[in-house]
Image: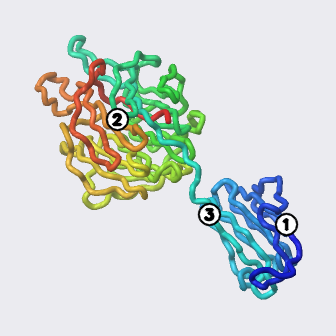
Amino acid sequence: MSGTIGSNILSHSGIIAESAAGLSWSDTIVTGSTVTVEAGKGYWINTTSNACTITLPSSAEAGDQIVIVDYARTWGTNAVTIDSNGLNFQGNDDSYTVEYTTNGQSVNLIYSDSTKGWLPLEDDVVADEPAPPPTQKGIFPFGYSYVVASDSSVYYGTSNIVNENGVMQADVSAVGGGKAQGAGATYGFDKGIHAFGNNSSGYTNVSNLISNVGVVSTDVDGVGTARLELSAVSYGSGNALFAFGNSGSVTNLKNLVNSSGVVASDSTGVGTAAASREECSYGGPAAGTAIITMGSSGKTNLVSNTGVIATDTNLPSGVSSKSQGAGCTFGDDKGIVGYGSPIGTHGGGSNIISNTGVIAADVSRVGLFRISMAACGYGGDKGIFAFGNFADDPGGSGGSHVGRFGTAVTNLVSNTGVIASDTTGASGVTGKQTEQACGFGN
């Protein structure tokens, strides 16, 4: 409302500025790179695609008010710049640069006088961005193992669900064809996708969607170069990507997955071509960031919330490179990578990933050494490593097939990143290796 005050308890008088609730709000979302605004109005500024320069009126009176709001929480990526159009802004002339660069910000501007000009009465940030609930269950589909009775490698299309308490469920009959050495990630916040790998015919780019109740879809011919030993992570607002791998030689290819589970065609990744890496998300759902590390390159690549893979960085001091391990999130915003074989020796310890993507020093291995397993989150803030093979064949059997026997061993990860001791496979769970995993449901 507006009007004239004769007096008030503070012995002030003057014009009441219109409150934000009483403004005339623009019914058009501003998406352009420039906009000229008017006093007495509120504006939704969407900088998803580009930064925006906001030009204020060239003349103003005391009490004039303008409100601007970060419509899509993207000012941190594409900033808003204020052009005061000849008038002062907080006592400075319009040669000064005024930027707002915080996601979720709203700015309530009031014109004072010719000396101070426009003043931000409020420049609040909406800190509590709505976030989807974390996934509660996990799923481990596909994989393979050597079968002594038939003297052959069997590719499995079966899957195993991990419930919200971290208990591995018995095999679920196959829907898609058997495959191994692919990758899987959560998309759309509550569903999963698994793609690429190999089967009895060779490399494949087949994909399978996982519903929010854990149902694996039938095979879909994939998009992109068939390859195996690649990585998959969630990023951004319900998106995922597949990256790196081996298509006959190591690659740095990348395939983005949108929030509807559609796999895009190949694009060239950034960083050294590599395979057999470890990966996880970090920073929490609001951050939407991930890390792909170690493997054949021995390097680390961070993944932004827009799916951009950063250039290589070296591993920190005290961190040993591993290959053919796995990784998952835990807590609200951290991750862990572990097991696998340090290049040139058997090891298989673990490393915590901080909520800013920093890899902590090695922690000694828990349980028996194994490689070619998978990992995923469960219960909202915990994780699980499962399956894989004992590459040193501790049972002493297998002859020339040492290292090809899959297991059903699991290791739970607490919400503080502590890996529990080995749990042997439950009844009805077939041992396997080079399977894939992701979280689903919420």
Measuring 53% from the left and 39% from the top, which residue is drawn there? 189
Measuring 37% from the left and 58% from the top, which residue is drawn there? 358
For the residues carrying marks 2 and 1, which lies nearer the camera in this image? 1
Mark nearer the N terminus (1 vs 3): 1
Disc on res. 374: 2
The residue wearing badge 3 is: 125
Measuring 18% from the left and 37% from the top, which residue is drawn there? 368
Residue 436, quarter of picture: top left
For the residues carrying marks 1 and 3, which lies nearer the camera in this image? 1
The amino acid type, in three-letter code, at marker 2 is Ala
Task: Check disc 2: other Cα within 10 Å, few if <14, some if 14-19, many if 20+.
Answer: many
Mark nearer the N terminus (2 vs 3): 3
The amino acid type, in three-letter code, at marker 3 is Val
Q: Where 388 falls versus 177 (above or below)?
A: below
Measuring 36% from the left and 34% from the top, which residue is drawn there? 165
The amino acid type, in three-letter code, at marker 1 is Met
Residue 173, quarter of picture: top left
Mark nearer the N terminus (2 vs 1): 1
**Res. 346 in view:** yes
Answer with left or right where residue 297 lies relative to residue 339. Answer: right
**Res. 266 in view:** no
Task: Check disc 3: other Cα within 10 Å, few if <14, some if 14-19, many if 20+.
Answer: some
Answer with left or right where residue 104 lies relative to residue 207. Answer: right
Answer with left or right where residue 360 lies relative to residue 84. Answer: left
Q: Where 110 falls versus 157 (above or below)?
A: below
Q: Where 29 falls versus 238 (above or below)?
A: below
Proximity of marks 2 and 3: CB atoms separated by less than 8 Å: no
The residue wearing badge 1 is: 1
Element assignment for label 3: loop
Which of 131/349 is in front?
131
